[in-house]
Every structure is written in structure tokens, then in C-alpha cells.
Amino acid sequence: MLTLPNILTLSRILAVPILVFLLWPEPREFEYGLAFGLYALMAITDYFDGYLARAQGAVSKLGIFLDPIADKIMVAAVILMLVLTRDVSGFATIAALVILLREIAVSGLREF
């Protein structure tokens, strides 16, 4: 069932390609600004989808399933784009890899 909280979660997933487009291949300052604004909006929807689901008594299995996936996709897309466009290099690349591996490990451990 598509409730407002689930629509907010799905909007985050659907916004990821736009975010990637803004950061690909050689973003300018204007595109970085738009990407930051979109990422901030996505983060706000991340807060409100859970808040609204609990407040409205609309917590659903779909929302419980999609919310962490949307979070991981959002974070991974930004990190990968920053590494691929060489805006992050050297030791920061290792930190980005550690963050990505942590996200994967946490998701995997939650399944047990």
C-alpha cells in the first residue's frame, strides 16, 4: 500500500539518478550546489518518512524494507560519484571504501 511515508521513501530512490547526473562526469560549482540541495532534501525526507509512519500508525513492511535500501543507495551513489569524478582521492578513497564496506556489512548483519 502506498502511504505518504512510502511515497517519501520511494522519492529518495527515484531521486538518486538525478543526483548521479548532477555529479557526472565533471560537475561545476552550480551542479555541486544543486546536488547538495537535492541530497539535503533527500535527507529531510528520510527523517519525515519514519516520523510520519509512526505518527500516522502507517508503519508497513514495505516501508521497513525500502527505507534502509534507500539510505544505502543514497549514500553509496554519492560516495561512488565523488571517487569516480576524482573529487575524493588518496587516503579519502580508502575512507570511502571503508564506509561503503561498512554499509554493506551492516545491511548484511541486519538480515540475521
Image: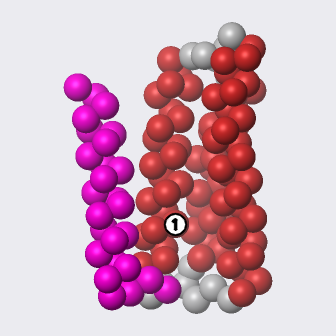
Q: Which residue is mark 1?
A: 78
Quadrant location of the C terminus in the rendered image: top left
Which residue appears at 74% of the width and 53% of the height? 41
| Above/below status of 88 relative to 50 | below
Q: Is residue 84 visible?
A: no
Q: Position of residue 40 (x, y in %)?
A: 70, 58
Which residue appears at 63% of the width and 85% of the height? 27
| Above/below status of 41 relative to 65 | below
Q: Horizontally, is 36 left or right of 23 in the view? A: right
Q: Horizontally, is 100 left or right of 26 in the view? A: left
Q: How is the image coloured?
A: secondary structure
Q: Identify the magenta region.
A: 87-112
Front-most of residues 111 and 95: 95
Quadrant of the rendered structure where residue 88 is? bottom left
Quadrant of the rendered structure where residue 46 is? top right
Please tell me whether the stretch drawn in magenta is mainly helix, strand or loop: helix
Amino acid type, callout 1: Val
- Label 1 crowding class (10 Å Cα cut-off): few <14, some 14-19, many 20+? some
Quadrant of the rendered structure where residue 98 is? bottom left
Q: Is residue 4 magenta?
A: no
Task: Assign a secondary structure to mark 1.
Answer: helix
| Above/below status of 58 relative to 26 | above
Q: How many marks?
A: 1
Which residue appears at 37% of the width and 70% of the height? 96
Q: Is residue 101 magenta?
A: yes
Quadrant location of the N terminus in the rendered image: top right
Q: Is residue 41 visible?
A: yes
Front-most of residues 60 and 102: 102
| Above/below status of 100 relative to 110 | below
Q: Position of residue 62 (x, y in %)?
A: 53, 23
Q: Position of residue 108 (x, y in %)?
A: 26, 38
